[in-house]
Every structure is written in structure tokens, then in C-alpha cells.
Image (tube, rainbow, N blue to C red):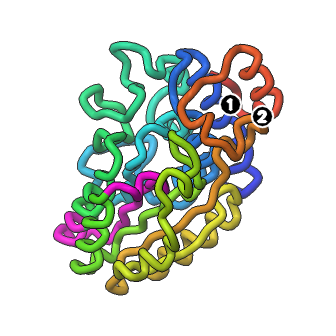
Amino acid sequence: MASIDELKKISSQVRRDIVRMVHGVQSGHPGGSLGCTEFFVSMYFEIMKNKAPEFEMNGIDEDLFFLSNGHISPVWYSVLARRGFFGVSELATFRKLNTRLQGHPATHEGLPGIRVASGSLGQGLSVAIGAALTKKLNNDPHLVFSLHGDGELQEGQIWEAAMYAAANKVDNLISTVDVNGQQIDGPVEQVLPEGDLEAKWKAFGWMVFNMNGNDIKDILNIVAEAKSHTGKGKPIVILMKTIMGNGVDFMMHTHKWHGIAPNDQQLATALSQLEETIGDY
């Protein structure tokens, strides 16, 4: 088991990877990636039961993870590499032509850890439900996890899938929503207010938990509690409060860093705030 201090050190290194990756090609989505860093590190280094560093596409006898808001691929790629799914040096190929680390996760390049192309928002919950039902049919007791953005909840397919999961008692699924309050065009409340998300998910028949996604201890505790309620007839959703751009002061609390890369000076400033704990790629 990894200690909280160890997970914090990995998180700091992952944040360095994120800002360096998007700076290297002057393209990508650092804001949400930085905000979800503790979540990804906790999931892959402590919570999920997977076969890392080995990877089998069929996902039998292990927990599965699906990233629906695929634009935050930098954090996923970094964590997969740091977990051993592929070499850390490959992070230097992010978003370059004819490489496996595309801007949005894809499958045809055969990148270990990626089971479905994502980034076309709204589709990931449907995919996760299909995977969860497959595990039920195969009598596989492992769980399916998915991550979504709060802006993504403006997609109608999410709520169709939510109805289906509740109606069919998909109770081996834990979905998490990154509630950072920001989307590409501005604050979620200004673009299209979503109201009381906890009440909405409960009305759709889901069990709801709330979590601080930038606090590793809270992540470990809340996900453990959520896991203890699987198998009880209801799908589970965790509303995860995060700060977009967390860890880099000038990127925090604003939608402006949703999808732009830092320049040389901004990169230097960001790296000065992030400790190198494991070693840069």
C-alpha cells in the first residue's frame, strides 16, 4: 500500500509532467488535468485492483477505468506511465504525429491502459455501463469506474445512460464527476446552470457521495465508502469538488486554462511551484 505522503510525491511529479507535456507542443488541456491529479494517482496507485504494469484489453479479473472527458489526457498518460504501463520517456511524444499519446485517448495505436477512444463528450457513461454489465454476465466481481466533467453533464446522453443504469441495477459501477465549475467557454453556472446535482442524481436513482478531489485522504476514504455500497442495487456517483489548475497558482479558479498551454516563462513559474520528486522524463 502507498502512503499518503508517497501519493502526494507522485502527484507533484505528475503535475510537472502535465505542464511540460502541454508546453512541449503548445497544445493540450492543463486545467482539468491538474485539478484531477490526486484522483488519478489515488485510483491507480492505491484504489483500483488492476494488473499493472501488465495490460490485457479484455479487462477480465480486474477493475476497469474509463475517462469520458478525454481532453484531460495529460494526467491520465502521466499516471499510466508512472504506474508502469509504458515508458515514462514516451510522455515526450504527447500530441505529436504518428505517436500513441494523441490529444484525446485513442485505441488504434495500442497504448496500454486505454480501452476506448474518448473525448467526444457524453459517451463515456454508456461505455462504462456496458463494461459493468459485461462483468455481471461473466460473474466477474471487479468494479468499473468512470470519470466525467461537470460541463459534460450538459450532454443529454449522460442522463439517458443514468436512467438506464438505475433501471437495470448496475450496482458494480462507480462514476465520478469532476465538479470544478469551469468549462471551455466560462463558468458552468454562466454557460448552462445545472442546479442541484446531488438532487438530480438521486432523482435518477443513483446513490450519491461527495468528495474533495484535491485531498488524497478524503479520496481514499470516500471511494472506500462508495465501494462498500456496491452490489446493493444502485449505481453510485461521486461528486468530486476540485480546483481547475490546482497546484499552479496562476492557472487556478479560471476556465482560461482549460485548453491552452503555458509559454516558456509560465512553464518556468509553474515548475518552480511543483517539486520534482521522482524525476522528470
Please name whichever residue, 196 or 19, is drawn nearer the observer in this view of the structure. Answer: 196
**Which image quarter: residue 275?**
top right
Identify the image quadrant of the C terminus. Answer: top right
Structural crowding at the residue carrying mark 1, measured as other residues with C-alpha within 10 Å and reported as few (<14), some (14–19) or many (≥20): many
Identify the image quadrant of the N terminus. Answer: bottom right
Please name whichever residue, 247 or 219, is drawn nearer the observer in this view of the structure. Answer: 247
- Badge count: 2
Percent position of residue 203, x then y: 39, 82
Percent position of residue 258, x then y: 56, 37
Percent position of residue 242, x then y: 64, 55
The residue at 41%/58% (across/down) is 153
Percent position of residue 50, x then y: 42, 54
Query: Does residue 231 appear left or right of residue 2 in this picture?
Result: left
Is residue 131 found inside the magenta-colored segment of the image?
no
Is residue 148 found inside the magenta-colored segment of the image?
yes
Does 158 sit above or below residue 80? below
The residue at 49%/71% (across/down) is 197
| Residue furthest bottom as drawn | 232
Q: Which residue is mark 1?
A: 16
Residue interval drawn in magenta: 133-155
